[in-house]
Amino acid sequence: SAVISQKPSRDICQRGTSLTIQCQVDSQVTMMFWYRQQPGQSLTLIATANQGSEATYESGFVIDKFPISRPNLTFSTLTVSNMSPEDSSIYLCSVGLNGGSGDTQYFGPGTRLTVL
Amino acid sequence: GENVEQHPSTLSVQEGDSAVIKCTYSDSASNYFPWYKQELGKRPQLIIDIRSNVGEKKDQRIAVTLNKTAKHFSLHITETQPEDSAVYFCAAHSGTYKYIFGTGTRLKVLA
């Protein structure tokens, strides 16, 4: 597996502002993913972030709202821009590791975002 | 589009009994099926996984079975304990490095 950290762990933000979430992993990984998990719900993939290329966004998510950086193989950021209360959620990063079981994803601890 | 259905949404069992959670996937190209356990306020933790060339895999009290023909897979927990109480998510992976997650099952083990 991998040791994955996220910062901040939680934040309360005002409507209209932006928040950048950081994800750090203790080993070099090709695939990093960003998910959103609303209370009591499943995980929804926002985008896939590979180092050296533009992030690939899922349907319903756009780069202007959720810009992503992937400057190296151990780090990524997700920005939630121009926030509204509907953006209140838990945001999780994950990394894909090619272990013996295949392309397994391991999750960071998550960032709990509340937008007022 | 690709879809994973998961049932039941909630499950209550007596301590010591078995629990079974079932998932059905739509993409026949799916070839890897992980299961995650998420305790309240915590990250999803991988508990077991299975690849499409295997029909069953077991790890202590946890087992997963896969029926490729029917496109469904199941998680079996035997001798349940209170610490098994959590939300469990299945997922299907089709080689595009993208997971499709099920909707989750809230398991409650009653002492």
Image: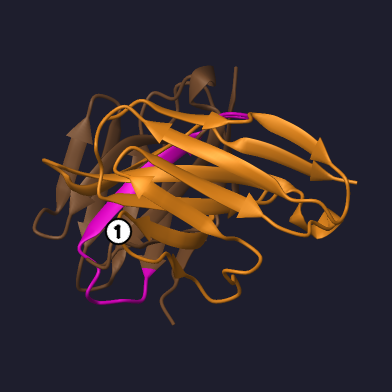
Chain colours: A orange, B brown
Q: Which residues are magenta?
A: B25-42
Between residue B73 and residue A55, name the one nearer to us.
A55
Place residue A8 in its image quadrant: top right
Q: On the rendered structure, is A15 left or right of B45?
A: right
Rendered location of residue A105, percent (x, y): 33, 45
Residue placed at 22% from the left, 66% from the top?
A: B95
Residue B37 coordinates in the image, percent (x, y)? 46, 36
Which part of the image, by quadrant, shows the N terminus of chain B? bottom left
**Residue tagged by mark 1?**
A52
Q: Amino acid at mark 1?
A: Gly
Q: Residue at x 35, y 62 (%)?
A: B98
Secondary structure category for the residue under label 1: loop
Q: Answer with the quarter of the image where residue A65 lies.
A: bottom right
Mark count: 1
Viewer-nearest residue: A81 or B84: A81
Position above or below: B46 against B1: above
